Image (tube, rainbow, N blue to C red):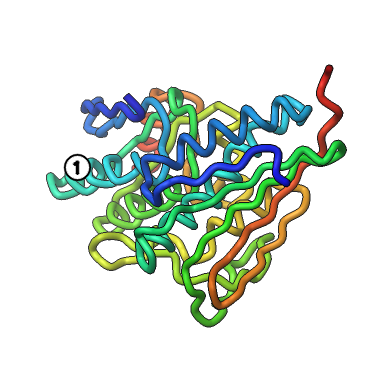
């Protein structure tokens, strides 16, 4: 069972809320202060990705975040229910090769792509200690974790 | 307010002051401003990020898009940023090699003038 679970309507306005909650839970879980900016950014990226996927495929479905304090690690899972497209190669750099639907967030309103699809996941992989992207036909879940110490009693 | 934007001209260069958080929700406003400035023939831009509290890949995409637009007119887009937590995402993505990043607006303007 997750320590904290949040579901929110897939609107960009709510991504900030998700970031703030995740940062607060991470702090309470004993994640070092120096890592909290990374938690905030990584969770924001994952949520932004999920929001855009839902807006394209299932705007009535909420995005889900599960945050778990396992004692030694703080684990965040951001899950969407958008059907996945065939795998696209990640951008050059340190990121994994995620299997994700095309991210419309990287496409400008005038059709040009300022940055390639999958960029958000590449950023996440540079921020979290451990990152796994699990893709099924019914959606994608992004698993991220950071080291934590036991919260003070 | 999540994002506050302002701009002014200094020595022929359009300086954009950004304050607050640039994310998937607020980035479109910055994007529209940069497009508007380019449409008004401002091709030498400096974006001052010193009061930016958060920047994600959506924001990076907007900045890259702005850079592409000005370069199409032989212009340039430079950044002012000394905050390590903001510079981090530029480093992770390798975009420190793409953008000129300066310590102050005056330094950015001086660098642009020396390029001419």
Residue that protrudes farthest toward the bottom in the picture: A86
**If the image is split into quadrants, where does the C terminus of chain A sit?**
top right
Residue A121 appears left or right of B41: right
Given residues B111 and A26, the one toward you in this image is A26
State the residue at coordinates (82%, 41%).
A70
The location of residue A40, given as percent across then percent down, is 59, 37
State the residue at coordinates (29%, 50%).
B75
Residue A112 appears left or right of A132: left
**Dot 1: element:** helix
Residue A16 appears left or right of A39: left
Given residues B102 and A78, the one toward you in this image is A78
State the residue at coordinates (77%, 53%).
A130
Residue that protrudes farthest toward the top in the picture: A153
**Looking at the picture, does residue B68 appear above or below residue B12?**
below
Q: Mark 1: few, some, or many residues within 10 Å (few <14, many ≥20)?
A: some
**Looking at the picture, does residue B108 appear above or below residue A90?**
above
Look at the image and tell me whether residue A114 can be seen: no
Given residues A66 and A56, the one toward you in this image is A66
The location of residue B97, given as percent across then percent down, is 56, 50
Given residues B20 and A101, the one toward you in this image is A101
State the residue at coordinates (35%, 60%).
A59
Look at the image and tell me whether residue B17 can be seen: yes
**Looking at the picture, does residue A88 appear above or below residue A30?**
below
The location of residue A114, given as percent across then percent down, is 39, 60
- The part of the image, by quadrant, that contains residue A24 is top right
Number of dots carrying numbers: 1
The chain to which mark 1 is attached is: B
Q: Which residue is tagged 1?
A: B37
The location of residue A131, given as percent across then percent down, is 72, 56
């Amino acid at each position: 069972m997750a320590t904290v679970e949040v579901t929110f309507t897939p609107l960009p306005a709510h991504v900030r809320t998700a970031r703030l909650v995740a940062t607060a839970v991470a702090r309470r879980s004993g994640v070092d202060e120096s890592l909290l900016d990374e938690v905030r950014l990584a969770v924001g990226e994952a949520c932004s990705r999920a929001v855009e996927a839902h807006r394209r495929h299932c705007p009535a479905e909420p995005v889900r975040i599960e945050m778990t304090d396992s004692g030694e690690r703080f684990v965040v899972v951001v899950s969407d229910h958008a059907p996945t497209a065939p795998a696209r190669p990640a951008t050059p750099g340190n990121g994994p090769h995620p299997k994700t639907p095309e991210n419309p967030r990287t496409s400008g309103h005038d059709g040009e792509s300022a940055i390639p699809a999958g960029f958000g996941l590449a950023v996440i992989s540079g921020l979290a200690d451990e990152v796994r992207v699990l893709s099924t036909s019914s959606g994608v879940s992004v698993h991220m974790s950071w080291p934590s110490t036991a919260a003070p009693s | 307010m999540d994002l506050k934007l302002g701009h002014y001209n200094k020595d022929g260069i359009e300086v954009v002051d950004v304050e607050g958080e640039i994310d998937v929700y607020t980035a479109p406003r910055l994007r529209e401003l940069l497009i508007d400035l380019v449409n008004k023939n401002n091709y030498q831009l400096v974006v001052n990020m010193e009061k930016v509290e958060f920047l994600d890949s959506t924001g990076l995409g907007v900045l890259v898009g702005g850079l592409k637009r000005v370069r199409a007119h032989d212009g340039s887009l430079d950044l002012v940023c000394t905050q390590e937590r903001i510079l981090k995402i530029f480093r992770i993505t390798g975009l420190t090699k793409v953008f000129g990043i300066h310590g102050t607006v005056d330094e950015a303007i001086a660098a642009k003038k020396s390029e001419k």
